Each structure stands twice: as structure tokens, then as C-alpha cells.
Image (spheres, helix red, strand yellow):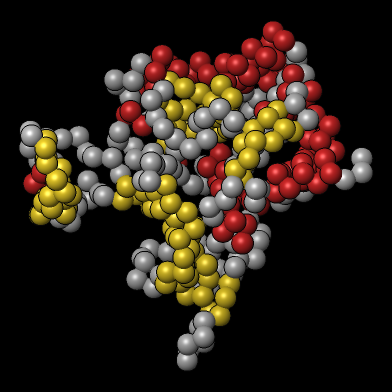
Amino acid sequence: MHSLSNFVFIRVLNEDPILKTLTLLGTVPVTTNAATTSEGDVAAVVTTTDDKNKEVQSVILLIEKTHFATQSAESDITRRISELLSTGSNDIYHWWNAIILEGKAHDPDLKMTVISPATEAHISKYSRQERKMITETAEVYHKAILPWIESQPKSRIQWVYNILEGLKEQDNILLRDNDPDTGFIVLPDSKWDKRTLSSLYLLAISMRSDIRSLRDLKTEHLPMLKNLRDKIMALVPVRFSGVASDEVRLFVHYHPSYYHFHVHVTHVTAQVPGSTVGQSHLLDTIIDNIENIDPDYYRKASIRFALGVNHPVYNLIQDFQSGPQ
């Protein structure tokens, strides 16, 4: 998909006034072999009611307002203001809304991610939903959650293997360690604009395919975790001048958005989804829990986290707690 000229708006799935994001659902005409995604799911394909009766597929647009470019005489944002609309004043303070002229390639106004074709699972995931705190005991994990994770087809994370195997996004890779046991790759997260250091967001993906989440971590994985931590802490200050090692935050999501072990790397001031208590676990704490408290800490622990009520894990936990054991 290279254009939005055929995009037909259906509805707003979600919006966040703090993060300045908007998620839209729409359709585009079905392309050849597009009704099945790389994840092996049948896309949410519908048929229009117009006189041509064309088949269309669901598309999700994740839209985010970008940060201002570094200001200079060439990129002065005030030069793009075409109109100022006063909303009030008091003494020396004046408030305006501003109309901005068309941007340039080096200073875009919006950043977009397109999911096409989008499945019903994608639509559910990106729709606004209630979030609740819920506790996953070791028992419910091993009896209900783990079987569900193991049932997920590997094709759902084909995009991960494409990166690890050198098939996609190779120009984005900042660091590659090919050791099969302790290796990983580092690349910018798709949510980062690749220019604003205060919102730095990188992703480190393990070479190992046998670690799905922090629940799988134990003593034998400490060399991998420490190797990843140490090399990233050395990389960031060199690659991104102005970001010190003590301004780098490394954390793991639980539950993750996909079940292949990866670590999120952000600037300590970055406000990114999933970096709050109830979803993120600091990598240093994970290492300490395994090394100094219990080698099987994450196999035994009850973990409390925030989860959307549409998430399959939320429903699995609820069903397990309410049903006969």
C-alpha cells in the first residue's frame, strides 16, 4: 500500500490527546492474494454495496503528530504559520491557535503506521477498551496461558524472523550480534521519529526463538541478558551523542505484544506506551531476581499487570478463575 487515495473512512478506533495519536479504521480495494495476512489469518474482508460491488479489505491507520524538528533558520516553525487565531489574552500573555502551511520531507507533520490487511484481531487490539489490573498466578499461566501462547502460529511473528534472518529492515539495524545463545539485534522502534533524542526508542530482539516472554527466563539466560544490557549501554552514548548511559531505560513488557523475547530501550524521559507500572519490568530487576532471589523466579511468580478487557489473556484468566479447576 503506497497511497491513501482509495482509503474509505469507517470509524475512529482510538485516540489519545496526551500522546497526540489517532487510530482510524477504513477500507481499501482488495489486492491480489491480500485476503490472507502473513500471520495466516483471514483478513476482515467485506463487500461494498455500491453498483460495482467491489471487494475491499480492512485497513488500520495509526497516526501520530511528530515532534518539532531541531529549530534553525532553515527549519524555523514560525515561517510555516499562515494564520494566527486569538483565543484570549491577559496582561503580557496571549493565546493563539495557529494554521500551519504544508510541511517538507525533512520536517513532516505526521507519522503513520498502516496495517493492511487488518484482521478482526488487529481491530480488537487497536480499539479503545477498558483496562483492568489482573493477577496471573503461576498455576493459571502454566495451565491456561502457556497452552494459548503455544497455539499461536509462528507465522504471526514472521516479520521478526524477516529481520533476524536479514530479509527485511537491514538498513535500520544499529547493532547485530549473531551468537545463537547470547546474540540480538538492535534497531529503532517504529514508534520513534528517529530524530528526537528525548523520545529515543529502540528495540532489541533476541536471536533465540525458545524465549517467548520473561516467564521463560532462568539462570541459563543470564549471559544473554547481561550481554544485551552491556552492549546497548555502550552503544547508545556513542551512536546518539547527547544521551548518556544513565539516561537509558531498558525494560520488558508483560504481557508482550508478541511472543519472541525482546527488550525496549528508551530515553528515561520518553513517554511511550507500556512504560508504566503494570506493564513494564526493568531489565536490571529481571536479572537481579533470577541471579539473587530465585533462578525460577518468573516461573513461580504471581504477576499483576494492566490489560485491556478485549485481550485473550484477560479472558483466559477470568475463565480459569471462575471455572472448575
Query: In front here: 178 or 200?
Result: 200
Residue name at image x 42 percent, y 47 percent: 16
Question: Is 230 rendered above or below residue 250?
Answer: above
Q: Position of residue 226 (x, y in %)?
A: 58, 16
- Left or right: 104 in relation to 13: left
Q: Position of residue 222 (x, y in %)?
A: 66, 16
Q: State the residue at coordinates (69%, 36%).
A: 134
* Quadrant occupied by the N terminus: bottom left
Location of the C terminus (image quadrant): top right
Q: Residue furthest top?
A: 292
* Residue ID at (92%, 44%): 324
Please state the total of marks drawn on the protein image.
0
Q: Is residue 52 visible?
A: yes
Above-or-below relation of 58 to 168: below
Q: Residue furthest front?
A: 90
For the point 7% across and 33% down, which residue is it? 92
| Farthest residue, direction bottom | 51
The residue closer to the viewer here, 279 or 135, is 135
Q: Residue 309 location in percent, x, y?
A: 65, 48
Left or right, residue 122 beside residue 291? left
Tell me the quarter of the picture where residue 201 sits.
top left
Residue 237 relative to residue 85: left or right: right
Q: From this viewpoint, is residue 150 visible?
A: no
Tell me where residue 253 appears, x and y as whole percent.
59, 32
Q: Is residue 276 above or below residue 83?
A: above
